């Protein structure tokens, strides 16, 4: 690690991040979220933690299990294992149908409400069980995670298995979301003795690189199967936060495997995605942009959401680890300052999720169908770890 950034600056940021994680964010979820009667978590929480909807969204339940199990694996604090267990047991009882399809939403008691024609609930179920198996040492639960992972790979290759019909006029395309989530999944499942995992890792890395190489200016959300850009609204779509997340996934994988070239690609992805996505007039990252400057069809395109900024915090600290460049650390501080000034809620804890372009919260809840105990604590925890490593602590 370079000494370009002073220990004092590193310590200042570490203190701020740690105070927010342990004094605000984790206490909010540990106090308000566990359902001690039926298991699992209340994930629809108002600003002050009151439950505004008792339904439970499987991908958020699974993300919270992963988060709590990961914290336990890092700290060995029993409160995190207890929290993970409540969620894991609920999911094992209720989340899957016999064919390993995961429901999207359940009642409080665990009855199915809805299911998506996507693979993301299944992916996060695998992440949760793999991390929880590591926490408990359960070979049975680890085997369950592997079994559902095998189903995920089949679903990826044949969308009809999740009920998604591919019509004749639909453009054939590659979506960045799939290799991203699978690379993250394999990292949690990582076992060098499993050849299938190595094959999946290679496909994920090559596909993310293909998206990054389709246009030298941007990382595109959708490209043709051969990697070429598509002149459609979907083909022109840039999601800066998603691309930054892909960049730090690559850096994380490359750092673990010692692939310096791939790590540089991850840094480049984070840099150019931020350069294109940052709102120079009002600050914050745009949610969606069109690579040619057209108005994105998504009506929320100019909103500032919590999760892209969380990804950017991690991305720039990983870039700093890779390069030792003070510029990357400064960008981390820039994003963190925006988050603490606009998303953080010092009165009730945790972060607001949705801001308008000017930085005003549009929704007061802290948890909903798409925001749970995941992006904020994961970002703060990963940043805390990276800052400690930078300090040699």
Image (cartoon, grey):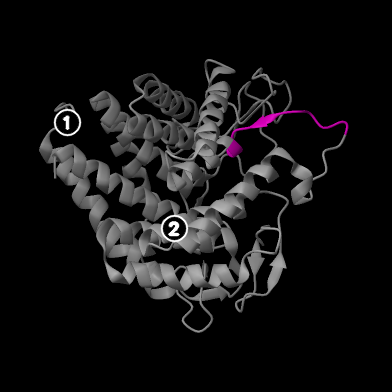
Residue 65 x, y percent position in the rendering:
45, 62
- Label 2: few (<14), some (14–19) or many (≥20) C-alpha neighbours in 10 Å: many
Direction bottom: furthest residue: 37
Asked where in the image residue 374 lies, by quadrant, the reply is bottom left
Residue found at x 55% / y 44%: 303
Question: Which quarter of the rendered picture does the C terminus lie within?
Answer: top left
Report the magenta residues as a range.
168-178
Give the x, y percent position of residue 3. Answer: 14, 28
Residue at mark 1? 5
Q: Principal SS element in the magenta part? A: loop
Can you tell which quarter of the image residue 73 is in?
bottom left
Residue furthest right in the image: 168
Q: Is residue 163 left or right of residue 247?
A: right
State the residue position of label 2: 66
Contact, mark 1 vs mark 2 (Cβ under 8 Å): no
Residue placed at 30% from the left, 36% from the top? 317
Compare residues 265 and 73 and report the one nearer the observer.
73
Asked which secondary structure carries label 1, the reply is loop
Q: Is 101 placed above or below 54 here?
A: above
Instruction: Please provide percent x and percent y for residue 91.
Output: 56, 68
Residue 282 can be seen in this image? yes
**In-front residue for pair 286/379:** 379
Label 1 or label 2, whichever lies nearer to me, is 2
Picture coordinates of residue 207 (x, y %)?
Answer: 57, 27
Q: Secondary structure at mark 2?
A: helix
Q: Give the mark nearer the N terminus: 1 vs 2.
A: 1
Mark 1: few, some, or many residues within 10 Å (few <14, many ≥20)?
some
Snapshot quadrant of residue 333: top left
Quadrant containing the N terminus is top left
- Mark 1 → mark 2, Cα distance in angstroms: 32 Å
Task: State yes or no: residue 170 in magenta.
Answer: yes
* Residue at 49 percent of width and 63 percent of height: 140
């Amino acid at each position: 690690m370079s000494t370009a950034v002073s220990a004092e600056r590193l310590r200042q940021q570490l203190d701020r991040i740690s105070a927010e994680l342990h004094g605000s964010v984790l206490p909010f979820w540990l106090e308000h979220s566990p359902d001690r009667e039926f298991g699992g978590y209340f994930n629809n929480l108002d600003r002050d933690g009151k439950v505004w909807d008792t339904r439970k969204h499987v991908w958020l339940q699974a993300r919270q299990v992963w988060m709590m199990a990961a914290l336990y694996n890092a700290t060995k604090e029993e409160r995190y294992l207890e929290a993970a267990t409540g969620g894991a047991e609920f999911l094992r009882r209720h989340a899957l149908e016999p064919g390993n399809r995961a429901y999207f939403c359940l009642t409080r008691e665990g009855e199915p409400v809805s299911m998506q024609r996507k693979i993301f609930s299944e992916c996060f179920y695998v992440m949760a069980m793999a991390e929880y198996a590591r926490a408990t040492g359960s070979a049975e639960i680890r085997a369950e995670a592997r079994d559902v992972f095998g189903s995920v790979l089949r679903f990826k290759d044949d969308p009809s298995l999740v009920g998604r019909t591919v019509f004749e006029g639909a453009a054939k395309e590659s979506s960045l979301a799939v290799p991203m989530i699978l690379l993250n999944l394999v990292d949690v499942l990582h076992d060098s003795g499993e050849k299938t995992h190595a094959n999946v890792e290679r496909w994920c890395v090559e596909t993310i690189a293909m998206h990054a190489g389709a246009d030298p200016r941007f990382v595109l959300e959708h490209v043709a199967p051969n990697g070429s850009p598509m002149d459609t609204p979907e083909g022109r779509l840039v999601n800066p936060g998603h691309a930054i997340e892909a960049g730090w996934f690559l850096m994380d994988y490359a750092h673990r495997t010692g692939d310096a070239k791939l790590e540089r690609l991850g840094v480049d992805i984070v840099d150019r995605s931020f350069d294109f996505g940052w709102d120079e007039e009002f600050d914050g990252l745009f949610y969606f942009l069109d690579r040619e400057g057209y108005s994105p069809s998504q009506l929320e395109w100019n909103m500032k959401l919590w999760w892209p900024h969380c990804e950017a915090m991690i991305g720039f600290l990983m870039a700093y680890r890779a390069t030792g460049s003070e510029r990357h650390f400064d960008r981390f501080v820039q994003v963190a300052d925006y988050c603490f000034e606009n998303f953080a809620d010092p009165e009730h804890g945790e972060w607001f999720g949705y801001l308008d372009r000017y930085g005003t919260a549009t929704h007061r809840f802290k948890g909903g169908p798409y925001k749970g105990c995941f992006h904020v604590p994961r970002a703060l925890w990963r940043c805390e770890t990276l800052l400690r490593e930078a300090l040699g602590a």
